[in-house]
Image (cartoon, rainbow, N blue to C red):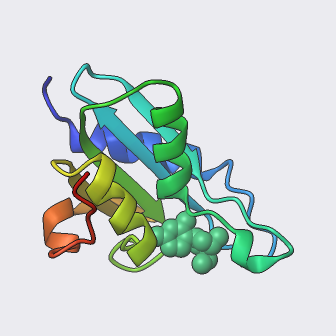
């Protein structure tokens, strides 16, 4: 599977348009790419009970996992934010568990061509794991 970061960034930017963020008004989109070449996207969803809010990265990941997708090779996250939005700690933990080998691309929705790349392991070294 040839990895095209721009294509994944565009999918995240498109997903961002469906963000449900009436409280923060901070729209985030995320997209995951599987080894098989499928793209699964999501956006943040907020609640009046603020703590129930779920980030775009986790929405995309939960959608993908519960549709039986696996072997994620990359994820992209887009928001209107200088330098692009860095995934929060909770999302890093989930990515580390379910997409440990993925590359992470972030971009500002106003500048989709400037992409920063990380690995999940860069973003969360020494992650919490339970050895079954
Ligand atoms: N948010 C994300 O979707 N991803 C992140 O990595 C950090 C924050 C969302 C949650 C909330 O809806 C809004 O951004 C403001 O925090």
Horizontal relation, residue 86 to residue 62: left or right: left
Horizontal relation, residue 97 to residue 122: left or right: right
Instruction: Give above or below for 131 relative to 47.
Output: above
Q: Residue at 72% of width from left, 69% of height from top?
A: 52
Horizontal relation, residue 95 to residue 17: left or right: left
Ligand 1 location (quadrant): bottom right
Q: Position of residue 76 (x, y in %)?
A: 35, 52
Q: Position of residue 57 (x, y in %)?
A: 47, 56
Residue 9 vs residue 95, the one in the foreground: 95
Q: Residue at 70% of width from left, 59% of height from top?
A: 45
Q: Position of residue 64 (x, y in %)?
A: 47, 34
Residue 116 vs residue 114, the one in the foreground: 116
Residue placed farthest to the top in the image? 36
Instruction: Give above or below for 85 relative to 73.
Output: below
Instruction: Give above or below for 23 relative to 47.
Output: below
In the rendered picture of this protein, how many numbered marks are placed on residues?
Answer: 0
| Quadrant into which the N terminus falls | top left
Q: Residue at 27% of width from left, 47% of height from top?
A: 99
């Amino acid at each position: 599977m040839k990895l095209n970061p721009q294509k994944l960034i565009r999918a995240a930017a498109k997903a961002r348009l469906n963000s449900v963020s009436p409280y923060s008004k901070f729209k985030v989109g995320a997209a995951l790419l599987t080894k098989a070449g499928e793209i699964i996207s999501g956006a943040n969803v907020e609640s009046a009970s603020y703590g129930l809010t779920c980030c775009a990265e986790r929405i995309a990941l939960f959608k993908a996992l519960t549709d039986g997708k696996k072997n994620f090779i990359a994820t992209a996250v887009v928001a209107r934010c200088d330098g692009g939005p860095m995934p929060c700690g909770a999302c890093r933990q989930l990515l580390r568990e379910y997409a440990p080998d993925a590359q992470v691309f972030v971009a500002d929705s106003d500048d989709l061509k400037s992409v920063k790349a990380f690995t999940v392991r860069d973003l969360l070294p020494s992650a919490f794991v339970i050895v079954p």
